[in-house]
Image (cartoon, grey):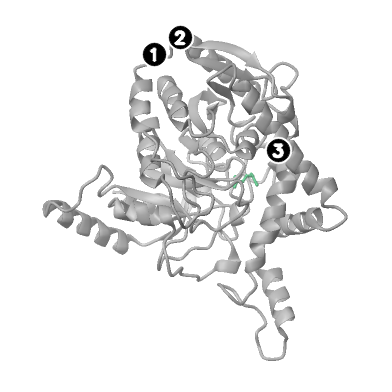
Amino acid sequence: AYLDRIAAEDDALGAYLHVDGEAALRTAEQVDAARAGGTATGPLAGIPLALKDVVVTEGVPTTSGSKILEGWRPPYDATLAARLKNAGTVLLGKTNMDEFAMGSSTENSAYRVTRNPWDHDRIPGGSSGGSSAAVAGGLAPWAIGTDTGGSIRQPAAVTGLVGHKPTYGSVSRYGLIAFSSSLDQAGPMTRTVLDAALLHEAIAGHDPLDSTSIDSPVPVLAEAARRGAEGDLAGLRVGVVTELGGDGHTDGYDEGVLARFAETVALLESLGAEVRPVSCPAFDLALPAYYLIAPSEASSNLARFDGVRYGLRVGDDGDRDLDEVMALTREQGFGPEVKRRIILGTYALSSGYYDAYYGQAQKVRTLITRDFTRAWDDVDVLVSPTSPTVAWEVGARVDDPIAMYAADLCTLPASLAGVPAISVPCGLSEGLPVGFQIMAPALADDRCYKVAAALE
Ligand code: GLN
């Protein structure tokens, strides 16, 4: 049924970069046979899913949305892809994304523009916009996205989905094509909170192949979602972040987004939560800090795309030396946003500027983490809008990187501090979905699911 939906809708939607229907049907038959033989168990066996194209998949084209990886078929599976395979899920295909996950609209893909199923003239968010469009458009029951500064939560918010960025280190990054290694996390994008919890449980857990993987048991999340669905939040202490859309901080926010947010906070109160405002002054600096740290790490991570090891190679005709081939390959293989970030990051890391830019940004990162730590003395969760606006029109921000970056205003603090954050739908503004963000202390992902389920 999903393959039929893809065949009928994806020309218009542009959610997928690669679909292999025959392979999917073959896997589904194998799972069916295993189940009939009593060897396939587990709650996810036979369920189709889509993976963002940043996830390395053995033998299946993986591009990270970039021309520089066109034609690359990885020789191995990312840990999360292997876990989902072992759980018996059926891979429908790989979804479109901003090149190397840099963007908030999926318009930075080297391959195609993805449309928002709610309104085809609007963006599906980004960088996991192929995953959000696939799930919101009914072209996959659920999908995996990755989130470096908001790329699971923002696309989920603007397409009416649930999206969760796990605690940093709780889902293996092994086999995720690296953008900013101290920030990248993979997580679920789904239609319901319970689905997100189930998918998250399937990919979480310690992995010795990722040196930043936390060695703790797989979190119990579906149970938290089920408890939350009972709708009793008595005693829960909720902090509303002043700096994210509160008094004096409403510049750039849609009125409709703020109205839905206020209604949802009132709903939390009516479910028994104690709500208070919490000021996190350093959050005001999250945007500039992120846009130094992420490009710095990217400039280092993307050095490996040299025309020798993977994918594209340009100008290797015998007359050019290695440096020229590398330069030509990178010139033609990377798109404009990726080049902007490599240049910015290289500059910020260069000697003489390091302390002024990268060093300062890391200090801001520490201040943001401290704001969170202080908040956890008084509240159990912090809440904010997920995105300051609803989905904008395709093309509206492509020539204005600062406007594009502003979409990440609310999602960046949790990324920089490594804490978990979920986006759950909270109604419509101008007929378009609005997301509500719930942030919790590190490793308390279950709180995000519980509160989100109570609001569903
Ligand atoms: N929009 C942000 C950026 O462009 C976040 C991207 C992400 O989370 N991958 O960097």
In whole angstroms, how far apart are the C-alphas of marks 3 and 2? 33 Å
Comes first in the chain, label 2 or label 1? 1
Q: Helix, strand, or loop for circle 1?
A: loop
- Quarter of the image for residue 350 reads bottom right
Residue 319 occupies quadrant: bottom right
The furthest residue to the left: 37
- Residue at label 1? 232
Cα distance between the residues tagged 1 and 3: 35 Å
Question: In screen coordinates, is 136 left or right of 390?
Answer: left
Give yes or no for contact between labels 3 and 2 (Cβ–Cβ under 8 Å): no
- Where is residue 140 shown, x and y percent of the image? 37, 46
Dot 1: few (<14), some (14–19), or many (≥20) neighbours within 10 Å? some
Viewer-nearest of labels 1 and 3? 3
Q: Which of the image's four quarters has the C terminus?
A: top left
Q: Which residue is mark 2?
A: 272
Residue at position x 54%, y 42% from top? 168
Tell me whether the residue at label 2 lies in contact with that at label 1, contact meaning CB atoms closer than 8 angstroms. yes
Residue most extreme to the bottom: 318
- Image coordinates of residue 121 in percent, x first then y, are 57, 42
Q: Say whether disc 3 or disc 2 marks the residue closer to the N-terminus.
A: 2
Q: Position of residue 326 (x, y in %)?
A: 69, 76
Residue type pointed to by label 2: Gly
Residue 393 position in % (x across, y down): 62, 40
Q: Which of marks 3 and 1 precedes in the sequence?
A: 1
> Are the residues flagged by discs 1 and 3 in contact, CB closer than 8 Å?
no
Residue with the mark numbered 3: 365
User: Would you place residue 59 above or below residue 2 in this image?
Assistant: below
Residue 7, visible in the rendered structure: no
**Mark 1 residue type:** Asp
